[in-house]
Amino acid sequence: MLGEGILKGLAETAKNFAGSFVSAERLTTVEYPEQRIAPIEATRVFPFLVYDGPEWEAGLRCVACQICEKECPPKCIYIEKSKDKKPDAVGKQQFYPAKFDIDVSVCMSCQICVEVCPFEAIKMDTEFELSTDDRFGGLLHDRKQLAKSNEYYHHIHPTEAAEVDARLAEEKAKAEAKAKAAAAAPKPAVPAAKPAAKPVEGEA
Amino acid sequence: MTDSLVNASAVDKKLKGWNRPPIIEPDGEAELLEVAMGPHHPSTHGVFRMDVALDGERVVRLKPVFGYLHRNHEKIAEGNSYLASMPYTDRLDYICSLTNNWAYALAVEKLVGQAVPERAEYLRVILGELTRVQNHASAIGFLIQEMGASGTPLMYAFREREKILDLFESLTGSRMMCNYMRFGGCRVDASPAWLDAARKVVAGLPGFVDEFEALLRSNEILMARTQGVGILRPDLAINAGVTGPMLRASGVNYDIRKVDRYGIYDRFEFRVPLGDHGDVFDRFMIRLLEARESIKILEQALKEIPDGPVMDGKAKIRGFRPKAGEAYGRIEAPKGELGFYLISDGGPNPYRYRVRPPSLVNLTILEDMCLGQNVADVVLIFGSVDIVLGEVDR
Amino acid sequence: MKTVEEIKAAIETAVPGASIEIVPNASPSGQLSLLLAPNHAVAVAEFLRDDAELALDFLSNATGIDWPDKEITEKVKVMRQVLKTVDGAEKMVEETVDETRKHVQPGYLEVVYHLFSIEKKHGPVVIRMRTTNRTDQVQLPSLTPVWRSAEFQEREIFDLFGIVFTGHPDLRRLLMWDGFKDHPMRRDYVEPDDFEYEPTAHDEVLARSKAHQAAGQEGAGVGL
Ligand code: SF4
Ligand code: SF4
């Protein structure tokens, strides 16, 4: 019969229409921004810099090795290495980024910087509501804007952050053991660096 | 639908120049009307233009115009390291970023002779077939949308696609720009919870395909609009390099998953659906049937997936420099044969990086299919090719 | 499937006068290719398509490659008369010295076609052709009359590399616009100075931005 197929299709639509009133499964949309769907843990948006401890500037894990700057496919990271050194998470004297800018209008959220960073210093954020009305520079995030605490990292990616912390703790333990062994050895060439609370200026 | 193989040798290939579109003479004194469809036209899936010459309602000439989205992806890749091109491949066919990743990873693995662990191969198959299901669902949705059924079928397709994209997001971190595969495996492992979630989604897919089929298949309007429209002959399809569902809708049994058996496709049982007529309706049906076969593969892969590493131990991420040489690797992407041709000169960047885009090559016969048809059908025929401009223009 | 050597032999018996060279490939992929002389290319292509055993009815990929002039520096050891002080007296002595010699290997443009067989389900067979140079002798025969799938891909090669395909039915630019000059995929292509604004400029981008500012152009800025 002509029109049978159309009726069949309409029956299917009616089923879905009625279904959306009774089953939450069929009601698939939410009223953003009042309502939000539950965040997905692995989500990545733009990178941020992790810092340990209460002070963002002192606690930045980044040592300005500039690997991420080189590997970033659209070249949207800009780093200036510091002239002096300060102690890092394991207490070693390291350079730090005097300038660390990411142009998130160019960044394509690819996570390559995270993958190549040997110091677990840069991670992906989940914040996506970043619109500004300034075309030039409004989306250029400097290191202050990029710095987020390790607690925040734990808050957005709990599983991943726990793994990273375990790995860092292991490295720290190893470094300490090595430092101890070096101190125990007769006449150590370099005194084992003590973990300092504040950045030591001009030690380079 | 039959599983018959067209006897390609029976086709008379000797005829010189047979593969050109026929020249249609307009009736009598009729004046031709030239219409530029696009680049901003709701049916063009992006920025694409067709310069159409019409004699009344009838198409007598059609020239596609490309390049509105051209960014010279290949040149960018030649200035970047091998790894840095991986996220750019996501942006080729942005509906199916995972199959793009796969094709590129496969080509590089061929170039350097890199092995892939078994679990990674399974994950690739699972993600690749999920991609195929969501691509075919949205391709059908768009096709029907262009026919005038605004919304309903497309929204149904998108509802299902959403579930699959949520899976992608919870594994790879991104819904569409996944950047997941690496040379020698995959970036992160899938947790048991993810596999369970995937099983749940896959268990719901056959019901969705049934619903989709009931909604559309026997609809008289759809049949009237699509059957016998935009016919593509198998001999021309082969000669014009058409691949993917387009080729199989014309009845040619060629699926790279079966032919090359790349990855671990020889372990799964699935059939290759073939069309009889090569018209728009067949292309629509082929996509539905292929989605069903993909679900079969998914069920098998999710049952059999072994434990193990997802990255080969010898694989390198930083300082990756293949020996001088070249390789062409290809896979059966949802839209057709997606190939990558790489030449290495021993440096950290590829000397030559070429994408063989199925979407562009499949458009070669657009004019042939549209000649003599009504202008309203051009939109439909174009929609049935299923292209993404990010891949056409690169 | 036949090996590349067998295909070469088969072509040479079927197409008299065709000269074919096998291009080596050191990669583990093992995809060797056949270098065709342009004057016989169409005949060879027709043979490859129509031969019952090869039946390469499907041209999958066609692309160009640019090989610019290459300056080759070689270190050679030569025997030479050298003035030397031996035992307080100056003498001419024969000695081997290192000498660097330079010569320029002329560049060319190349097209590569990847052929498969849908009927026999084998492949790829890779064929290549080379132009004489990169400037005025850039004509190659088009294979579009043999395989239609080359139509857009050859147009793309013409557009991006500047190889002129004789016998192509509709050779126009594909991706760039018609008034565009130059060929972007060539290795020596110079990008136009359209630098606009780049907050994170460094390396090449910074150099470009500086050049742009030096030229007194508007709209250039480094936001640092
Ligand atoms: S996410 Fe990708 S594009 Fe963005 S800063 Fe990191 S490497 Fe660069
Ligand atoms: S973020 Fe990591 S890779 Fe980038 S400069 Fe800092 S330490 Fe190096």
Image (cartoon, rainbow, N blue to C red):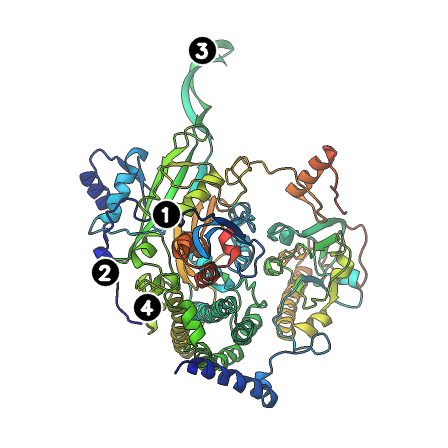
- Using the image, name the chain to which the residue with label 1 belongs: B
Residue B275 as seen in the image, left or right of residue B183: left
**Amino acid type of disc 3?**
Met
Q: Which residue is mark 3?
A: C92
Disc 3/disc 2 C-alpha distance (Å): 81 Å
Instruction: Tell me whether the residue at label 3 lies in contact with that at label 4, contact meaning CB atoms closer than 8 angstroms.
Output: no
**Callout 2: helix, strand or loop?**
loop
Q: Quadrant of residue B179?
A: bottom right
Q: Nearer the viewer, residue A152 or C116?
A: C116
Q: Quadrant of residue A176?
A: bottom right
**Amino acid type of disc 4?**
Leu
Which mark lies nearer to you, 3 or 2?
Answer: 2
Q: Position of residue B134 (x, y in %)?
A: 49, 71
Q: Which residue is mark 1?
A: B23
* First along the sequence among labels 2 and 1: 2
Residue A34 as seen in the image, left or right of residue B211: right
